[in-house]
Amino acid sequence: MSKKFTTVLMAIFTGMLFLTVGILTAADVPNEVLIENSYSKDKKGPVKFSHNKHHVDYKIACTECHHEAKDGKQVAWKDGDPVQKCSACHNPEKGEKGDPMKLQNAFHKNCKNCHKALEKEGKKTGPFKKCNDCHEKK
């Protein structure tokens, strides 16, 4: 076999490998997640969150929501890293000084602030003004 043919064959094989890994990784992500409230004085119902709408339809990167902490500092989450529940670091009952903030505040900051920013840009966005637009009734 010629060197050029071997190089092309290896490039195709490598591309197929990355494509396969990407498809298998995406297949592990649920289409919809029910974000349960875990507060002792829970007043609102859970929130249905659609991964498909956010990631596939709106092209929002995983790192817009997912992150992790190392040595007490927030670092970027990378594709393939395990995804923990937010409550693994964010306490549902009280926030720590600095990070990590209280779970409810972390959700609201991430979701509501993103939707507000989209509205300011004149883009289509999800709800963020009324609790019941996101939270199901209890």
Image (spheres, rainbow, N blue to C red):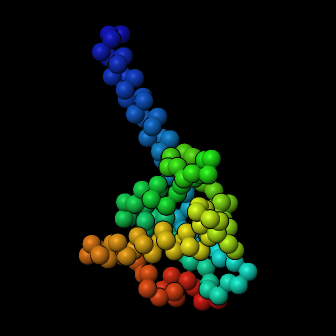
Quarter of the N terminus within the rendering: top left
Left-right relation of 103 to 51: right
Q: Say which residue appears at 57% left-offset and 46% top-offset.
A: 81
* Residue nearer the viewer, 64 or 126: 64
Q: Which quadrant of the structure image shows residue 126? A: bottom left
Give me the residue at 63% from left, 56% from top: 84
Residue 80 quadrant: top right
**Circle count:** 0
**Residue at point 57% right, 85% down?**
136
Q: Position of residue 15 (x, y in %)?
A: 40, 34
The answer to whether 129 appears left or right of 80 in the picture is left
Q: What residue sits 59% from the left and 74% below the top?
A: 104
Kindly tell me whether residue 24 is visible in this rendering: no
Image position, residue 125 (x, y; %): 36, 76
Q: Is residue 85 above or below residue 126?
A: above
Q: x%, y% of residue 98?
A: 58, 63
Q: Is residue 80 left or right of residue 59?
A: right
Please state which of residues 93 and 22 is positioned toward the viewer in this rendering.
93
Outermost residue to the right? 40
Q: Is residue 136 visible?
A: yes
**Quarter of the image where one finds residue 88:** bottom right
Pick the quarter of the image with the C terminus.
bottom right
Of all residues shown, which one is farthest toward the front? 97
Q: Which residue is situated farthest in the left direction here?
A: 122
**Along the viewing direction, whichever of 15 and 79 lies nearer the viewer:** 79
Which residue occupies the foreground of this view, 6 or 70?
A: 70
Q: Is residue 103 above or below residue 64?
A: below
